[in-house]
């Protein structure tokens, strides 16, 4: 456990480094040298961004250990850091301007110990950041909880049965919403936390801990919560990159839990819409 860092200092470091990495990616957007695949779904930009972040952390004279997309688990002392160097690689590869860089700091290797972090858009907008007990920020502006979030739901679902179940449950929440899926879970969870949407739901069972760590920390500091498909508060170890499964997140915990309850009730025999 690392106790020598002030949480606000960690937030500022996360904003600075995530923003610089996002700027580097933006400068090389639509460049085939950066979008070339090197292994699996990894592209050159992923590796360059991650290398930059780790070098920048060392430049801050920080001792870090943690987990990152390309390296997996690394280091054995210092404060814990969780790095997603490029969330939205598919968008970035196809020159679609919606992607982000995420950095989260934690006291140990669990999601519930996250104390600060930032999610920086690669193309448009200011970094979204937080520190535990000090609030959430959009750029340099401290956010207040909106009276009424925007009527947008960010949703990702591929299985037809899950899709029918989700739409049925959403209909019975009696919310007049518009459904979007833009391609960066971290950004979208943060936008939910900022009141730009009412709900985030990824029902593909493949989101990873690094994809959502900083965004979930931001959401919780803003007063919201993220759950898994069993209505359990989302948690994960950071021993390595691992799948956390379905993620449902909202500023309004009652909305998220009611949706999950409705989906569970419908089960495997969804009625027609």
Image (cartoon, helix red, strand yellow):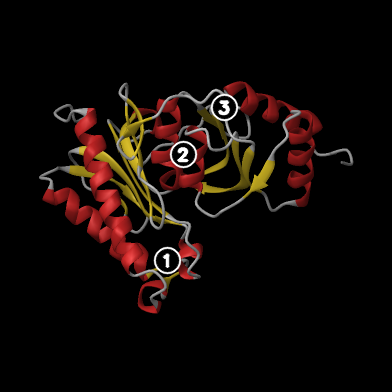
- Earlier in the chain: of badge 2 and badge 1, it is 1
Specify few, some or many for label 2: CA neighbours under 10 Å numbering under 14, 14-19, or 20 or more. Answer: many
* Residue at mark 1 to residue at mark 3: CA–CA distance: 31 Å
Furthest residue in direction left, as rendered: 61
Q: Residue at x 52, y 47 (%)?
A: 207
Location of residue 239 (image quadrant): top left
User: Image height check: is 168 above or below 257?
Assistant: below
Q: How many marks?
A: 3
Quadrant showing the N terminus: top left
* Residue at mark 2 to residue at mark 1: CA–CA distance: 24 Å
Which residue is at the front of the view, 178 or 190?
178
In this figure, which residue is indicated by the disc labeled 2? 190
Residue 191 image offset from top left, x and y in percent = 49, 40
In this figure, which residue is indicated by the disc labeled 3? 232
Horizontal arrangement in the rendering, residue 29 relative to residue 150 (left or right): left
Specify few, some or many for label 1: CA neighbours under 10 Å numbering under 14, 14-19, or 20 or more. Answer: some
Element on which disc 3 rests = loop
Residue 182 image offset from top left, x and y in percent = 56, 53
Element on which disc 1 rests = strand
Residue 208 image offset from top left, x and y in percent = 48, 47
Q: Which mark is residue 42?
A: 1
């Amino acid at each position: 456990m690392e106790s020598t860092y002030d949480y606000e200092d960690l937030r500022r470091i996360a904003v600075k480094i995530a923003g610089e990495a996002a700027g580097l990616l933006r400068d090389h957007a639509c460049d085939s040298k950066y979008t070339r695949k090197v292994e699996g779904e990894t592209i050159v930009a992923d590796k360059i961004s991650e290398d930059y972040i780790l070098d920048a952390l060392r430049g801050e004279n920080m001792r870090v250990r943690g987990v990152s997309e390309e390296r997996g688990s690394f280091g054995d002392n210092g404060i814990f850091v969780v790095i997603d160097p490029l969330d939205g690689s598919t968008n970035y590869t196809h020159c679609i301007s919606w992607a982000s860089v995420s950095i989260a700091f934690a006291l140990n290797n669990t999601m519930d110990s996250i104390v600060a972090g930032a999610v920086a858009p690669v193309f448009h907008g200011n970094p979204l950041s937080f520190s535990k007990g000090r609030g959430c920020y959009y750029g340099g502006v401290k956010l207040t909880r909106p009276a009424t979030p925007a009527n947008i739901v960010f949703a990702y679902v591929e299985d037809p049965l899950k899709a029918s179940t989700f739409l049925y449950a959403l209909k019975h929440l009696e919310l007049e919403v518009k459904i979007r899926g833009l391609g960066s879970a971290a950004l979208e969870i943060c936008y939910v936390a900022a009141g730009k949407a009412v709900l985030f739901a990824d029902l593909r069972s493949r989101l990873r801990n690094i994809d959502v760590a900083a965004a979930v920390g931001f959401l919780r500091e803003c007063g919201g919560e993220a759950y898994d498909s069993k209505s359990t508060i989302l948690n994960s170890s950071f021993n390595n990159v691992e799948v956390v499964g379905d993620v449902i997140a909202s500023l309004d915990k009652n909305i998220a839990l009611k949706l999950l309850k409705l989906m569970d009730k419908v089960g495997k025999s969804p009625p027609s819409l």
